[in-house]
């Protein structure tokens, strides 16, 4: 079993732990930067305090043998301090056992959208919702916004200043802990017996940013029969824009997927008098766009990602307090309370979203123009454009032939296609910058327990825990019909002269009626580069007033609550084996979960279900498509769901001999209703074969019940690339979901002799019925097997049900008319995941006056096989192995085959210097369309192949950290991360790298100081 030498808080020796309800955890946490009150109570000459090993057993049985058979890693606050107090995101991404971590901004992947400001851990890459996160051994409420309510606990609410150690069990543990522990358990444990006051501060320099910094204060008091611990911490992250990193800003034909869109502004127009031809606004290239083609349509590709951030501005605060008291010689009381608030006030995104939904007849200038964004001949922008451009070059949308024609062809107006209200010039409602939304999280948790021992030696523990997290998410999108009305000069809140009559009663361009100008002569310049637009006419600029009228705020407030009551008995039997008495534990648990989702009126499906509901009052949507009134985003249905779970569990500890110990555990959980019940046993054994070598093995079944947000019938909208263009993808809940199930196996060998210790473990997860969202890429490729231009399966009877999942503005064969796609949460295909964990450490004494420690941790994944998946009777995703793959738009996260680190550490007296090298193996983008021959076109329309990025290169990053104990109970830390300033590996993704795996910051410098009083 893995263990660390670790100092307790307050400099006191920490005794060997023999009763821990939380099963283990590895190096996962938040910036415990200045949270380890440590041996600085010793003088500088004395150096760090030596303490006893902490052994984690992951059992409810008191006195379970400290050499139990579970694969556990433990890391303490001091060890994090020696590493330079890495941030939460750095820690989670660096863990060899973890893949696909939330934390960095990643708004272009549906698995991370809406999660800005929150964090997670993802053991084995099986999904963050399948890692059970505990705080002092007890459960926490899920983050209602993360991964569309998939059931992920927000690790950013953990009070870092109060944490003493983190433990990770890298094995399925449902038999002990119940639902969610499929991949393992992470337990954050607070400091014990902390005495005194400690204050800390840190600052991190990041090029292109104002830096990250934080403050924290911890106070503890120990009496004879009681103790108190309190802490408060504040962390600030400064904005880091995509525009501040050259590697994220590549030309279109270098990385077409890195934030380039054909639906832009400047945009494309189709003359009403010649509807088979089109032209792009000639200011496209001047403003920094790429004058290219989407099929035969001339479009202005524009770079939207520089409006976004790699790191969002964020402020977070956590306050924590706990009290422990001996009520009698055999009865103890514990109570704790936690509050956390995280604020992301300026979440940056594109100035506006693409025009996917289309106007209805009520807003159209004529019945024949319904379903099109029509610019009438009296639009001032069009009039000025014709005057400035006597001729235009049009392209046949049928043959691709180009012709120069008089601009008077636009005298009958034009259709605005491949468009959005604002692009390269920014949004005037936000100072000609990005559209700005917000994220905020409030978490509260209180837990208390009584524990003791009866006169017959049987121990007991009764606990109650309540926790909740409330998430608020806001953003903006364009109201479809209002945008069309503004094109016609009927925009603005002052235009309607008769509010009682449906529609807008006014005269175009007169009085309070305002025009929206879709041409580039309304754009002052490129909002990112600052390049001025020579065609700009300030008299034609779009006003903030008309913009705010059609560009409306969507907001949702979602909350999850959890109540847990549990009771455990434990003791020893009268049965004695050669190794000792058989010990046992048994208990019951009741959990009640609650989920609630509220939406503001404009984004509430019950109030505004249709494109033509606002202003026109229509609620019987055309074609029964109830996706709301916005161009891109969908509306939400309010939800209020709760569930109750009953559980009973038991354990046996069998000391078969002095060298062989076995543990047996089983748990029964009943969800009631359609979800049903589950029974999960587990067995584990450890054999100390020689003094220096031991073997361990475990086998069991584990499970995860569906969380409340996925059992409702409402949906959330994600933004995902479909055939090269971002479309709206609606993900619906499913009240008929069944629990996930997995059989888990672990076998390992441990070595320990002198100053050397090592372990090798084999793990395997046979995963059945995982709860997943249906794969977008698979559904699209099944209907369109040859991409955007080849033959497809539209109209084929066998694909009719699959085709019905797509919403089109015109028809299935017109790729550009795809408006949105419906997916559902389902019990998905089986998964088999297996591999090896490696760990080794050696200590050299007496080197340069001190000690040198060398060590390594690594994980090798040999297989991550996903079975074929069917949607509507069609195989949309053939079986594949996710190892070594990017796994874009699949149910798997990026899975490098090798991931690990090597460290060298020198300690002498008060000094500690550590170098760590992190290694992430290369992996492959398994998509074919982006790398196909001639998949893109240059400015002449000639085909271009972009082959770079098929392989995401291996990453080798080096960190240096130094810690020194100074006089006056002061500790100083300094760290350089990414010493050689390496860019993240190039990937054909919107941000130019893989945010689940890579690091966008470059070389950073961090200083921290703490003072104990």
Image (tube, helix red, strand yellow):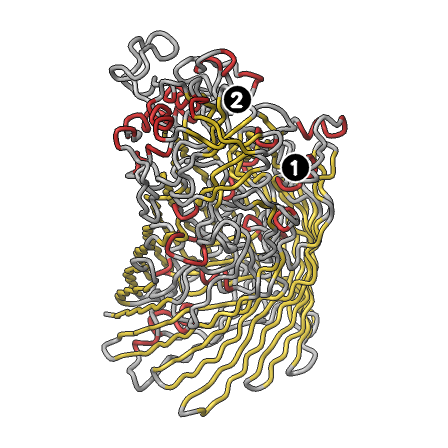
Pointer 2 and pointer 1: residues touching (CB < 8 Å)?
no
Mark 1 burial class by Cα count in 10 Å: few <14, some 14-19, many 20+: some
Number of marks drawn:
2
Question: In the displayed structure, would residue 964 be above or below residue 796?
Answer: below
Mark 2 burial class by Cα count in 10 Å: few <14, some 14-19, many 20+: some
Q: Nearer the viewer, residue 341 or 917?
A: 917
Percent from the top left, x then y, of residue 857?
A: 56, 71
Percent from the top left, x then y, of residue 208?
A: 33, 59
In terms of sequence position, does the residue under pointer 2 or pointer 1 come before the other?
Answer: 2
Q: Nearer the viewer, residue 787 or 330?
A: 787
Q: Is residue 959 left or right of residue 739?
A: left
Percent from the top left, x then y, of residue 98?
A: 55, 59
The numbered disc on residue 789 is 1
Residue at numbered disc 2: 274
Q: CA distance from mark 2 to mark 1?
A: 23 Å
Q: Residue furthest right?
A: 798
């Amino acid at each position: 079993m893995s263990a660390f030498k670790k100092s307790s808080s307050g400099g006191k020796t920490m005794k060997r732990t023999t009763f821990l309800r939380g099963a283990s955890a590895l190096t996962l946490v938040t910036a415990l930067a200045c949270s380890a009150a440590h041996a600085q109570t010793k003088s500088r000459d004395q150096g760090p305090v030596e303490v006893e090993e902490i052994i984690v057993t992951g059992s409810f049985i008191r006195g379970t043998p400290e050499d139990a058979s579970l694969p556990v890693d433990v890391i303490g606050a001091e060890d994090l301090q020696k590493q330079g107090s890495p941030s939460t995101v750095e820690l989670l991404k660096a863990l060899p056992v973890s893949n696909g971590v939330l934390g960095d901004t990643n708004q272009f992947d549906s698995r991370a959208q809406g999660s800005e400001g929150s964090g997670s851990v993802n053991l084995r890459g099986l999904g963050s919702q399948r890692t059970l996160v505990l705080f002092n051994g007890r459960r926490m409420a899920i983050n209602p916004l993360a991964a569309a309510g998939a059931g992920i606990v927000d690790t950013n609410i953990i009070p870092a200043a109060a944490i003493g150690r983190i433990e990770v069990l890298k094995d399925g543990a449902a038999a002990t802990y119940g639902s969610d522990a499929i991949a393992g358990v992470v337990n954050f444990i607070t400091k014990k017996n902390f005495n005194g006051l400690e204050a800390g501060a840190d600052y991190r320099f990041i090029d292109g940013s104002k830096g990250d910094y934080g403050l924290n204060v911890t106070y503890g008091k120990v009496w004879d029969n009681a103790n108190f611990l309190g802490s408060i911490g504040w962390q600030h992250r400064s904005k880091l824009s995509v525009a501040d990193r050259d590697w994220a800003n590549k030309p279109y034909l270098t990385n077409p997927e890195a934030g380039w869109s054909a639906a832009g502004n400047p945009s494309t127009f189709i003359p009403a008098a010649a509807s088979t031809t089109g032209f792009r606004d000639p200011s496209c290239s001047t403003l920094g766009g790429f004058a290219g083609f989407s099929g035969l349509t001339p479009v202005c590709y524009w770079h939207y990602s520089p409006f976004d951030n790699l790191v969002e501005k964020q402020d977070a605060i956590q306050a924590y307090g706990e009290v422990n008291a001996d009520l009698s010689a055999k009865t103890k009381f514990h109570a704790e309370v936690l509050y956390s608030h995280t604020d992301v006030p300026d979440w940056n995104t594109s100035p506006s979203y693409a025009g996917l939904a289309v106007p209805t007849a009520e807003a159209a200038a004529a019945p024949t123009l319904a379903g099109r964004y029509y610019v009438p001949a009296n639009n001032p922008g069009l009039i000025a454009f014709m005057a400035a451009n006597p001729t235009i070059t049009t392209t046949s949308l049928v043959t691709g032939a180009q012709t120069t024609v008089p601009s008077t062809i636009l005298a009958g107006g034009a259709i605005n296609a491949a468009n959005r209200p604002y692009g390269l010039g920014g949004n005037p409602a936000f100072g000609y910058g990005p559209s700005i939304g917000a994220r905020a999280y409030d978490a509260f948790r209180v837990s208390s327990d009584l524990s003791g021992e009866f006169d017959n030696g049987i121990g007991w523990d009764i606990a109650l825990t309540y926790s909740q997290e409330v998430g608020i998410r806001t953003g903006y999108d364009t109201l479809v019909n209002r945008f069309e009305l503004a094109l016609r000069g009927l925009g603005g809140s002052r235009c309607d002269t008769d509010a009682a009559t449906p529609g807008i009663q006014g005269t175009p361009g007169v009085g309070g009626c305002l025009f929206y100008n879709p041409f580039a002569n309304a754009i002052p310049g490129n909002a990112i580069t600052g390049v001025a637009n020579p065609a700009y006419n300030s008299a034609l600029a779009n006003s903030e007033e008309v913009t705010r009228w059609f560009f409306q705020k969507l907001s949702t407030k979602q909350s999850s609550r959890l109540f847990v009551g549990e009771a455990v008995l434990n003791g020893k039997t009268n049965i004695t084996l050669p190794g000792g008495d058989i010990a046992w534990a048994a208990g019951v648990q009741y959990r009640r979960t609650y989920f609630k989702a509220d939406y503001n009126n404009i984004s509430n499906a019950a109030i505004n279900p249709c494109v033509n509901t606002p202003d026109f009052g229509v609620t019987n949507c055309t074609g029964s498509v109830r996706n709301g009134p916005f161009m891109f985003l969908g509306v939400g249905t309010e939800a209020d769901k709760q569930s109750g779970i009953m559980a009973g569990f038991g354990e046996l500890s069998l000391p078969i001999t002095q060298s062989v110990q076995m543990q047996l555990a089983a748990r029964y959980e009943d969800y009631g209703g359609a979800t049903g019940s589950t029974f999960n046993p587990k067995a584990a054994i450890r054999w100390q074969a020689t003094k220096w070598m031991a073997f361990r093995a475990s086998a069991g079944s584990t499970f995860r019940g569906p969380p409340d947000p996925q059992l409702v019938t409402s949906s959330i909208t994600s933004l995902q690339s479909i055939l090269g263009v971002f479309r709206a993808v609606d993900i619906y809940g499913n009240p008929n979901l069944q629990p996930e199930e997995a059989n888990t196996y672990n076998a390992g060998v441990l070595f320990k002799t002198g100053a050397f210790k090592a372990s090798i473990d084999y793990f395997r997860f046979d995963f059945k019925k995982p709860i997943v969202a249906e794969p977008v890429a698979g559904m699209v490729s099944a209907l369109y097997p040859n991409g955007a231009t080849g033959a497809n399966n539209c109209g084929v009877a066998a694909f009719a049900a699959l085709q019905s999942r797509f919403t089109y503005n015109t028809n299935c064969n017109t790729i550009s008319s795809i408006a949105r796609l419906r997916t559902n949460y389902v019990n998905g295909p089986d998964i088999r995941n297996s591999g090896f964990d490696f760990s080794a450490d050696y200590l050299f004494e007496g080197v340069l006056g001190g000690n040198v420690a060398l060590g390594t941790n690594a994980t090798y994944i040999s297989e991550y096989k996903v079975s074929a998946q069917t949607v509507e009777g069609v195989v949309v995703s053939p079986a594949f192995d996710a190892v070594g793959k990017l796994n874009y738009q699949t149910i798997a996260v990026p899975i490098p085959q090798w991931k690990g680190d090597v460290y060298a550490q020198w300690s002498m007296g008060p000094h500690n210097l550590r170098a760590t090298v992190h290694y992430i193996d290369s992996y492959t983008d398994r998509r074919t369309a982006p790398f196909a021959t001639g998949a893109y076109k240059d400015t002449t329309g000639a085909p271009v192949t972009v082959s770079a990025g098929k392989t995401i290169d291996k990453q080798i990053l080096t960190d240096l950290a130094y810690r020194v104990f100074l006089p006056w109970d002061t500790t100083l830390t300094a760290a350089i991360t990414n010493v050689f300033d390496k860019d993240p590996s190039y990937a054909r993704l919107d941000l130019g790298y893989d945010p689940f795996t890579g690091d966008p910051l470059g070389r950073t410098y961090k200083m921290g100081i703490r003072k104990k009083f």
